[in-house]
Image (cartoon, rainbow, N blue to C red):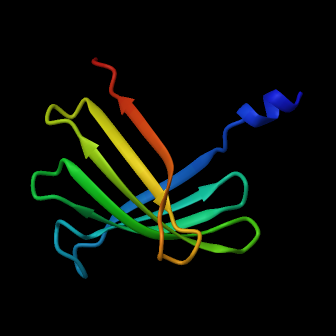
Amino acid sequence: MAARAQRERRRLIRRLRYDGVRCTPYDGYVSIAFLSDGSRDISTETVSADGCTWTSQSTMTTSTGQTVPVRSVTTISPDGMRQTSTTEVSPDGGKTWKHWYKDESHKVKE
């Protein structure tokens, strides 16, 4: 039973929107995410000119109310078929950063 609980994944709802009025095309994205454990994350996303690198800075509010700075970099392959994201958290308010997770995904060809 304990091993199953450790493998249980959190569920996530994420909304990404573009704000072209206040921002340029490369830094106008805002992401809001809600996790099943009660955590939430609001981030500002910046996109490279070629669209292949997304950089995110955010503050996550945990289910216990603690705020934690989070940053991530997502790289998309030139053909748009693969992406890799690396995310770090700072338990001390941004003084030091530690690896939190890496995510790799790919599209299934139609």
What is the x, y in percent for residue 73? 33, 54
Residue shown at the point (28%, 32%) measured from the top left: 82
Query: Which of the 4 image quadrants contains residue 41?
Result: bottom right
Residue shown at the point (29%, 72%) measured from the top left: 19
Q: Nearer the viewer, residue 25 or 100?
A: 100
What is the x, y in percent for residue 24? 17, 74
Residue pushed farthest left? 50
What is the x, y in percent for residue 18? 30, 66
Question: How many marks can you see?
Answer: 0
Q: Nearer the viewer, residue 37 or 69?
A: 69
Residue 98 versus residue 20 in the image, above or below: above
Residue shown at the point (48%, 70%) measured from the top left: 96
Quadrant in the picture for the N terminus:
top right
Quadrant in the picture for the C terminus:
top left
Residue pushed farthest bottom? 22
Residue 78 versus residue 62 in the image, above or below: above
What is the x, y in percent for residue 5? 81, 35
In this image, 96 relative to 25: left or right?
right
In this image, 64 relative to 82: left or right?
right
Residue pushed farthest front? 96
Residue pushed farthest top? 110
In this image, 76 relative to 68: left or right?
left
